[in-house]
Image (cartoon, grey):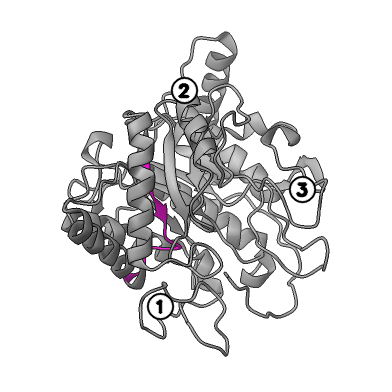
Amino acid sequence: MLRLPSCILRPASCSVHPASWLLPLAPFLLPCVALALVLVCAGTARAEGPGGLYTVRQRFGVNVISAYGGVPTFPGRITDYAGVEDLGFGWYSDWTVSRHAVLLPGMEFAQLVPTRGWPPNWSAVREAVVANPGALWIIGNEPETRGQGELTPAQYAQIYHDAYHFIKELDGEAQVAIGGVVMPSPLRLRWLELCMDYYQSTYSETMPVDVWNIHVQILQEKRDPPDNWGCGVPFGLDVAEGRRYTIVDCASVDIFKQLIQEFCTWLVEHNERQKPLIISEFGVLMPSWYVGGDEVVLQFMEGTFSYLLYARDPQLGYAADEGRLVQRWMWFSLNYPPLNPLTGEDDFGGALYDWQRPDTLTPLGQRYREYVRSASLYRLFIPEVHKGHAKEDLLAGKRSR
């Protein structure tokens, strides 16, 4: 499974300070904000967002924890959280197949067929496909990783073949996405290539992927103890280690950008860039006190959101979406407990809500809401990526390392 490292004492809570570069711009920004508010209140303004195939709302999503082991009263529905509609996201996943997912107006649900304990309940899948025409279907969750799919490339290729054709025969308009690897590191891209090779040799056709999908959880790749926290190495690859990211690297905007650009390059090299790319899970898995406090995670959130919204490249991007590198994404998570409520041990970070007080946003939840709201109101400058680097953007998150 994904392993958290043993760590040091928690630092004091970090307060959030406004960016200093905004102060000189205040005389120019305040009139614009005032005008926008007047127009919105008057009902005459339309939130244009950054343009392209999707609105801002459609691009932003969240992962929702539907249950937590040992906590029977865990609030696992989006409607359990007060004001969740104000966060501004337009799609979510809880890693399940659902015939009638809980939805708010303007919201979509991403179906996910679990690959552990294969085969799935095909009757339940059939009912969900028929009830949700044109839905997005993700086949598996981190299929290459210990504690998740734990599948070799050959095993996943067979599973993907069966699931893809089962869904498509019921709904030709369904969009089928490959299961997101933990991160698009070189080791995991090799695992994907072996999947595609096996599929081609076994079924005499290219692996049919409607939507490319990855996770971006920046973790160490190390198979054997000691100190083998992180995501290990992909099943079926006879290697001891890959990228040895550190604990604080999981909150690095620069590494996040590098991984996205490397994956987009990989798509181009494999003649697959004519398809949309989604990130069905990303964030900072480590509790904030592992990486320096809430402020570090907030900087990561803002920096990655800005990059995802506005980074484009005529060679690496998706042409149908004005050359954007990524089309849609989901933040991990809406409600995962940072402390195990049964043992008090550290668990995953990144929650937007305090699950024990489902009417209370965390600092991350407040910033998420503010960011999406601002991005929905204004059409901002869109940088292009050239030779692997993005032009400076006023909203780009920065942190020294």
Return the residue at label 1. 243
**Relative horizontal placement of residue 394, taking residue 335 as reference (left or right):** left
Q: CA distance from mark 2 to mark 1?
A: 41 Å
Q: CA distance from mark 3 to mark 1?
A: 33 Å
Return the residue at label 3. 355
**Relative horizontal placement of residue 326, taking residue 33 as reference (left or right):** left
Q: Residue at x 51, y 32 (%)?
A: 128
Q: Residue at x 53, y 23 (%)?
A: 106
Q: Point out the stretch of residues depicted in magenta.
A: 176-186
Q: Is residue 183 magenta?
A: yes
Q: Is residue 177 magenta?
A: yes
Give whichever of 145, 377 is nearer the camera.
145
Foreground: disc 3 or disc 2: 3
Residue 352 versus residue 219 in the image, above or below: above
Name the amino acid type tagged 1. Answer: Arg
Return the residue at label 2. 47
Name the amino acid type tagged 2. Answer: Ala
Q: Residue at x 61, y 38 (%)?
A: 369
